[in-house]
């Protein structure tokens, strides 16, 4: 099957899901959200012996979130690199000729390595990121078991700020379109920008 696949990468809480869902709705594309399968991919990669994934599945909440944000960020990129082959294998098995897929796992360097062309990134400004994380009801569940939830949340936010900076740098290095979402554009405006980048009529 000759599939058309649109990839949206970037940082969490940047508006990727909103745009992808709208493409799916308006163009009839199959929507695949990597985050919904992240645990599955990570555990599968761990079973293959991939070191970053293997380490991550055995860590306690404090071991994950009380680390230096830079170390967390570096690990995140390693994990996404290790699971990438599993993500693309899964995409190949989806019975649809038009797919829109999004997730932080689609880092620019991963996409260049696999030769994926129809790809953009969306990253948030720090203020936009933090304000939207605070609205997510699942955040406390992620930090469950941490000895200092306030510090853990701070570390998490710093990790993702660093992640966004690295994604932007990789986009610039590889000439990949990168939209910075500071919250001043409407959802319609964001959607119009993405449509133009993907050449959707």
Image: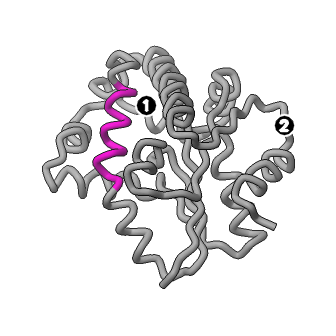
Q: Which residues are magenta?
A: 72-84
Asked if residue 102 is among those painted magenta in the image, a careful observer would answer no
The residue drawn where x is 57% and y is 53% is 119
Q: Quadrant of residue 128?
A: top right
In the rendered view, does 85 fall on the left or right side of 143?
A: left
The residue drawn where x is 40% and y is 19% is 69
The residue drawn where x is 75% and y is 29% is 182
Say what secondary structure mark 2 lies in: loop
Q: Is residue 39 above or below residue 147?
A: below
Label of residue 185 in the image: 2
In the rendered view, does 157 fall on the left or right side of 93?
A: right
Q: Position of residue 107 (x, y in %)?
A: 46, 43
Farthest-out residue, left? 49
Q: Quadrant of residue 27?
A: bottom right
In the rendered view, does 161 fall on the left or right side of 113?
A: right
Instruction: Report crowding for label 1: few under 14, some 14 to 19, many 20 or more residues within 10 A (C-alpha).
Output: some
Q: Position of residue 176 (x, y in %)?
A: 58, 43
Q: CA distance from mark 2 to mark 1?
A: 31 Å
Q: Is residue 157 above or below residue 77?
A: above
Residues 158 and 82: in front is 82
The residue drawn where x is 32% and y is 61% is 86
Residues 70 and 112: in front is 112
Say what secondary structure mark 1 lies in: loop
Q: Position of residue 130 (x, y in %)?
A: 63, 25
Secondary structure mostly seen in the magenta stretch: helix
CB within 8 Å, label 2 to label 1 = no
* Label 1 sits on residue: 143
Quadrant where the C terminus lies? bottom right
Q: Position of residue 116 (x, y in %)?
A: 48, 58
């Amino acid at each position: 099957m000759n599939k058309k696949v649109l990839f949206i990468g970037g940082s969490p809480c940047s508006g990727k899901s909103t745009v992808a869902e709208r493409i799916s709705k308006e163009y009839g594309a199959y929507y695949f959200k990597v985050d919904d399968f992240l645990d599955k991919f990570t555990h599968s990669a761990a079973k293959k012996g991939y070191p970053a994934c293997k380490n991550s599945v055995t860590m306690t909440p404090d071991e994950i979130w009380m680390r230096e944000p830079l170390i967390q960020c570096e690990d995140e990129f390693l994990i996404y690199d290790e699971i990438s082959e599993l993500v693309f294998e899964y995409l190949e098995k989806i019975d649809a000729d038009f797919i829109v897929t999004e997730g932080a796992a689609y880092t620019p360097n991963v996409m260049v390595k696999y030769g994926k062309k129809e790809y953009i990134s969306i990253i948030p400004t720090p203020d936009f990121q933090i304000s939207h994380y605070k609205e997510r009801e699942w955040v406390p569940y992620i930090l469950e078991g941490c000895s200092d939830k306030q510090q853990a949340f701070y570390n998490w936010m710093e990790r993702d700020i660093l992640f966004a900076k690295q994604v932007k740098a990789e986009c610039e290095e590889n000439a990949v379109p990168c939209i910075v979402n500071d919250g001043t554009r409407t959802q319609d405006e964001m959607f119009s920008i993405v449509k133009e980048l993907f050449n959707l009529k």
